[in-house]
């Protein structure tokens, strides 16, 4: 047996519990946390943009904040599209 493959399998098994979902977190808690994180990301981007306009923020920080905000908005739009698609599928089901 290949030692590298065995080592990789052992490390994967050791890390598996870290990726397991937490049973104490309910879906509504997770959704609230996502909405809060989304709002925080947009707020930080806005604050950084304002600071960049007044000369208080680094241009690099502005680019990084705008990229994070763009990613957050794209993720939110993708989730919304999936929810709408699922709702439309439910409406198409025969009763």
Image (cartoon, helix red, strand yellow):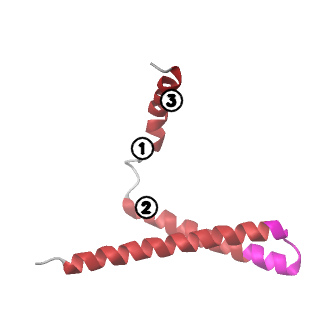
- The residue that mark 3 highlights is 8
CA distance for labels 2 and 1: 17 Å
Location of the C terminus (image quadrant):
bottom left
Which residue appears at 20% of the width and 80% of the height? Answer: 92
> Relative to residue 62, is residue 21 depicted above or below?
above
Looking at marks 2 and 1 on the same chain, the residue that comes earlier in the sequence is marked by 1
How dense is the environment of label 3, judged by Cα within 10 Å: few (below 14), some, or many (20 and up)? few
> Eyeballing the image, is 11 above or below 46?
above
| Residue in view at x 89 percent, y 76 percent | 55
**53 left or right, relative to 32:** right
- Residue at the (76%, 77%) spot, across then down: 49
Specify few, some or many for label 2: CA neighbours under 10 Å numbering under 14, 14-19, or 20 or more.
Answer: few
Q: Residue furthest right?
A: 55
> What mark, if any, has residue 85 been given in the picture?
none
Dominant secondary structure of the magenta stretch? helix
Q: Which residue is mark 2?
A: 29
Residue extending farthest to the front is 2
Q: Which residue is denoted by mark 1 in the rendering?
A: 20
Left or right, 72 with respect to 65, comes to left
Residue 36 placed where, x, y %? 54, 68
Of badges 2 and 3, the one in the foreground is: 3
Residue 54 painted magenta: yes
Q: Secondary structure at mark 2?
A: helix
Q: Quadrant of residue 81?
A: bottom left
The stretch of residues the image draws in magenta is 47-60
Residue 35 percent location from the top left of the image: 51, 69
Sequence-wise, the earlier of marks 2 and 3 is 3
The location of residue 34, given as percent across then percent down, is 50, 65
**In the image, residue 50 lies in the stretch drawn in magenta:** yes
């Amino acid at each position: 047996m290949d030692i590298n493959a065995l080592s990789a399998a052992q490390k994967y098994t050791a890390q598996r519990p870290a990726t397991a979902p937490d049973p104490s977190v309910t879906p509504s808690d997770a959704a609230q946390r996502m909405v809060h994180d989304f709002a925080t990301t947009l707020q930080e981007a806005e604050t950084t943009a304002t600071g960049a306009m007044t000369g208080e923020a680094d241009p690099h920080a502005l680019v990084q904040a705008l990229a994070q905000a763009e990613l957050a908005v794209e993720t939110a739009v993708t989730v919304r599209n999936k929810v709408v698609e699922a709702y439309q599928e439910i409406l198409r089901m025969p009763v």
